[in-house]
Image: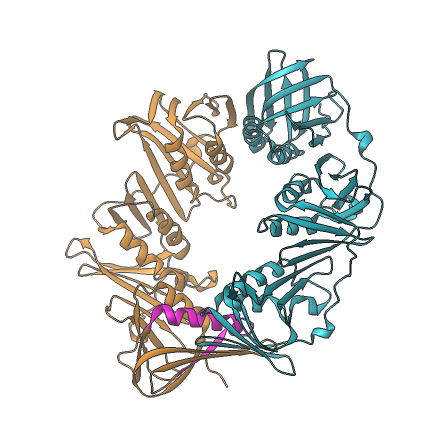
Chain colours: A cyan, B orange
Amino acid sequence: MKFRISRSALTEAVSQVSKAVSQKTTVPILTGIKAVLDEDGLWLTGSNSDLTIQVAVPSKKDDKELVEMERMGSVVLPGRIFSEIVRKLPGDDVEWVVDERWKTTLRSEQAQFELKGLDPEEYPRLPQLRDDQMVSIPADLLQSMIRQTGFAVSTSEARGVLTGVLWQLEEGTLTFVATDSHRLSRRQAEVEAAADLTMKNVIIPGKSLSELAKILADQNGWVDVIFSDNQIMVRADHLLFFSRLLDGTYPDTNRVIPQGGKTEVVVSAKELLQSVDRAALISRDGRDNVIKCMLKEDGRVLIHSAAQDVGSVQEEVAARMNGEEMSISFNAQYMLDALRAVDSDQIQIIFTGTMTPFVIQPADRDDALHLIVPIRTR
Amino acid sequence: MKFRISRSALTEAVSQVSKAVSQKTTVPILTGIKAVLDEDGLWLTGSNSDLTIQVAVPSKKDDKELVEMERMGSVVLPGRIFSEIVRKLPGDDVEWVVDERWKTTLRSEQAQFELKGLDPEEYPRLPQLRDDQMVSIPADLLQSMIRQTGFAVSTSEARGVLTGVLWQLEEGTLTFVATDSHRLSRRQAEVEAAADLTMKNVIIPGKSLSELAKILADQNGWVDVIFSDNQIMVRADHLLFFSRLLDGTYPDTNRVIPQGGKTEVVVSAKELLQSVDRAALISRDGRDNVIKCMLKEDGRVLIHSAAQDVGSVQEEVAARMNGEEMSISFNAQYMLDALRAVDSDQIQIIFTGTMTPFVIQPADRDDALHLIVPIRTR
């Protein structure tokens, strides 16, 4: 293996695959990054068994030669130190030579590194997925669907399927659902897919999705999502992202979502967010991070919280109200998460009762909702 | 106590005194911020016993009224939560009312907080310093003198006086010295002071100085430094900074600094820094973070490091050399710290032998030097 490569293109590719590489792994070779040079260019792979990212540096891009090949081959290099070296090398190009015992020389201007490489045959194979179960979706839409649901997954490993986001496809509509059983978030969008294609019980680990969201931030245009019984693959420009799926059956959450309510409030998302954010300064000192919300007939929403040793807070937000006056208590952090995820200036909150779940959604759309279970207080 | 105050002026003052407030303290009232309203304005004080910061918000500044007084008084408020509240309040002004039991109401537009305050009489008094031992110095010069020496103090509490920086004044020259016994940094500058004033064995804790450096970053013009047997005070615009001094006698370091050398090298500080920074990627994996430097008669400086399980690095930097060829090994981090602190494009390194300390200094000035003790290698 012997070639020269553009340092900036290499740096970008290494930074992307590094998102999948963990120093804490029971499979030592996975602390490494696999590099394969073939006629198309350089392929880098990083993996932590749950998720795998593969990125290509093509030989040419926009008429600019990025890789100048001399001898094909492959090697696995120590991930952390390799990515630090690449980032700090001085020149525009890197000369990269691997000998028959995987000893790798990286040379750039006055700097020369020798790294002990590993046999690439020992690196796990990528899963193979057939293209027949495929959905196409704009990268930025997929990213916001992840951002608007992923925060609601359970962070406790013991909760099994609830640590993942459920992806469903029916009649061209892709639905994401996440819940930790105290709150639930749901986001829907039309996508491009074969008319008869359905996706059921596809559960993707929340951690994989937060890495995927970071990667999608750098992508333009559309991406393909391909799924099988135990893997999902997202295919973008010169990039493949794989995640294993979670085993188990996701609970039916449809019957949890209330239809209609006793009291409906329309309010500025930003004003409510800022008031709850301030009230949380006090509630965070309490046991349940609980704030109390009073809906007044004259349209005022009063927010109150008190912590014994610190003090109390009272906030007021103007709203349009429809229905009965009501007092309801809930976890401030759940409300903050939902308000930050709602992508709308005005939101509608539908209350069904003091002790039953309430729903937050954009005032002008019904493709997103956030449900929160209230807290019983004295 | 009752007044209105500009929120932006209050936010800035709170953020400055917060630098001195610690949540970890054996004196519970020191987790608070003391506020005193008198005819000049609002005075805030934060302290962690080692260092104390006092900041004033004057009644008026540039013809703008910052504080609108109604009733004088004082209170101590919980520091962390008070500073978060002030930062997040919605309006331009804050109404601040304290009742006779220290209960404090902060009101701004639709937000109202009530905080449990404490009796300000229980807050420790500020030390009193007389103005007769005083030095004046530009704020930015004092900041760079701290930055260029403070990193060399010992971080081990057991090392006593070596955890501080020695300040000396003689014939109008202020000298800072810091050493952890493996390396030493010294910086000198002319200051304004009474001709016969001397400062001997004034040792200021490194931690206090790093907070002082942050505060000086916001200051223009000159500051006064006033010292006594056990305290130092820095007086700037609407700000007082106090630090206790370390007990004990600082060792005489003059005889450690070599006069003249066997080999002298002049080199670009930036090129050498970047090469050592890359070499440290490898050396950090080893036991002593050691790199080896070879000075070649033809003017090349070769840098080498190897770590058993990872690999090795070789770097080359062009230099002007005078004297014998030499190989010397040292801690990469000490060299990086010194090269980042040297405020000069070209530096001179004076080597006295393979096993004796070497000195790094600006090529064109003699007001700063960094000494490093080499490491014995096989």
Give the farthest residue toward the right: A249
Q: What residue span does the magenta drawing correspond to?
A: B268-294
Residue at x 72% of width, y 34% of height: A183
Residue at x 26% of width, y 71% of height: B363
Judge whether B294 appears above or below A252 on screen.
Answer: below
Judge whether B183 appears above or below B167 on screen.
Answer: below
Give the x, y percent position of residue B299. Answer: 33, 83
Residue A362 visible in the displayed image: yes
* Along the viewing direction, whichever of A163 and B204 lies nearer the viewer: A163
Residue at x 40% of width, y 69% of height: B273
Give the x, y percent position of residue B155. Answer: 46, 61
Judge whether A276 appears above or below B376 on screen.
Answer: above
* Along the viewing direction, whichever of A250 and A167 lies nearer the viewer: A167
Q: Is residue A365 magenta?
A: no
Give the x, y percent position of residue B351. Answer: 33, 80
Judge from the rendering whether residue A238 lies leftward or rightward of residue B78; answer left or right. right
Judge from the rendering whether residue B247 lies leftward or rightward of residue B103; answer left or right. left
Give the x, y percent position of residue B230. Answer: 33, 52
